Amino acid sequence: MLYYIIYRSIIHEHSSNTNKLEIAAMKSRLLKPSVKTITIKTLLTVIMLAALIMTIVIGFSFRTLSHKIVEGQALTISELVKAGLTSHMKAGIMDKRNYFLEEIRSLNEINSMSIIRSKEVNDQFGSGSHLEGDMDPVAAGVFKSGEPDFVLNEYSLHPNIRAVIPFNASSKGALSCLSCHEVAEGTVLGVVDIEIDLAEYRNIALLVMIGIGVISTIFIILIVGNIFKTVQIYVKDPLESLVNKAREAYTVQKPVSEDDFESMEFQNVAKEINLFNEDIIKTQKLLEEKNQELANLNDEIEETLKETVFAMGVIEEVRSKETKNHTKRVTEYCRLFADKLGFSEEEKNIISAAAPLHDIGKIGISDYILLKSGKLTDDEQEIMKDHTKIGYSMLVHSQRDILKAAAVIAYQHHEKWDGTGYPQGLKGNKIHIYARIAAMADVFDALSTKRTYKEAWPLEAIISNFKEMKGSHFDPELVDIFLANIDDFIEIQDRYY
């Protein structure tokens, strides 16, 4: 589908206005992201999500590991305390135990440490030293369960963990508790209550997380940069090159070189473009040939129509016993007027082709009236006027520009500028310009040539008549054009006399 999309843009470019295409392309580029942007955005989203998940997993794992390490450290210290106290008891130097406990308590990570003895021990040996603590709910719970309890306080300025670890009586091992204490197996003789400072662990954890974040960021930058470069080299640049080469191939009608692309996909697209290009060029050539044939046929039809129209005008001229070449002279007069008015070439061709039919409606007038040499009666005059309506009704149904113009001329060429003409009594600019021109041309030819009922007028009389009729019978502008170019009109008359 890629080559189809590319060629649609190429064909559209060659068939539309270049400026519009550039504006449309600019708007498209502003509204839609590039392939590079889409790829980087999608990839960056995935990488950021993966990095976030990885950071959370690593952070949670590190936190769990840190807790296990701290708990293990607390258990180790408690075992050391229990072993030391047992040794002091066996050696009979319990009165020296405070020195031992003070040494352990002085370790950097330990905020506080105390021993809480059970009721059984106090009953047997009496109260303990000043290093022995008081019973609280946490310690009471450990005495009851016989299992260590860890209370973590990690979300404060001074994070710490409180480890309350039981000292259970046991007869196993070298240091049998039951040899000194009169209690049952498994009785909790006491607990070691230790509070360990976690600030150093937290700082290490923060450093590790920052390190992970920095490494992840560098990793993401490297990946994005590499993908950015890869997309640029292997997608964006080849795609732009492919579009340009496809456009060039269409313009110069040469195939796109498949070896210019490294990837197999773009080579395949280039190959498909060349195949599609061949089909487009063949189809275009066929269309050009058909269009030329149609243009030639249309020109032939237009020329045939013009010849037919002119022949019809000549037929009407012969039947009405008009002066020879009347139709040709009227046609040329109309073209001259149109030229002086600044008409386009197309409009000049239309009026000169349509003018011969200005009196075609006389075909429907009887020979008795049409060929009468004497003056017509009022009733005969009214019948003669009907030739404008007859001509219009003959031509009005055509969709051809020439015949539509001929219908207007046939209907309105006897209208007068002051509104006293017929058949509609139109006034001024409401009379079509084609009809106003045809009226001037027809009257000039009628006055300047000999007819069966009159002689040709002298030029001075014709000029005087048009000046007199200016603004009443004829369009003032057309009269001015006629008078200013009288020599050109006389030249046409002499040429086709």
Image: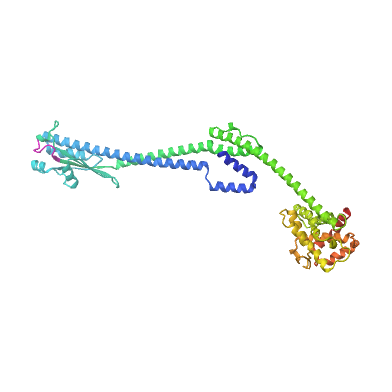
Q: Residue at x 58, y 40 (%)?
A: 4
x and y percentages locating residue 363 in the rendered image: 81, 58
Q: Which residues are magenta?
A: 180-189
Q: Closest to the observer: 497 or 276?
A: 497
Q: Closest to the observer: 304 or 296?
A: 304
With respect to residue 189, does 382 lie above or below? Answer: below
x and y percentages locating residue 212 in the rendered image: 38, 39
Q: Tell whether position 372 is magenta.
A: no
With respect to residue 135, does 370 lie above or below? Answer: below
Q: Is residue 406 left or right of residue 228?
A: right
Q: Give residue 428's quadrant in the image.
A: bottom right
Q: Closest to the observer: 5 or 215?
A: 5
Q: Tell whether position 185 is magenta.
A: yes
Q: Closest to the observer: 400 or 159?
A: 400
Locate the N terminus by quadrant.
top right
Residue 366 in view: yes
Residue 474 in view: no
Indicate the colouring scheme.
rainbow
With respect to residue 452, does 115 lie above or below? Answer: above
Q: Residue at x 77, y 65 (%)?
A: 423
Q: Is residue 168 left or right of residue 30?
A: left
Q: Give residue 216's quadrant in the image.
A: top left
**Number of marks in the rendered image:** 0
x and y percentages locating residue 236 in the rendered image: 54, 39
x and y percentages locating residue 209 in the rendered image: 36, 40
Locate the C terminus by quadrant.
bottom right
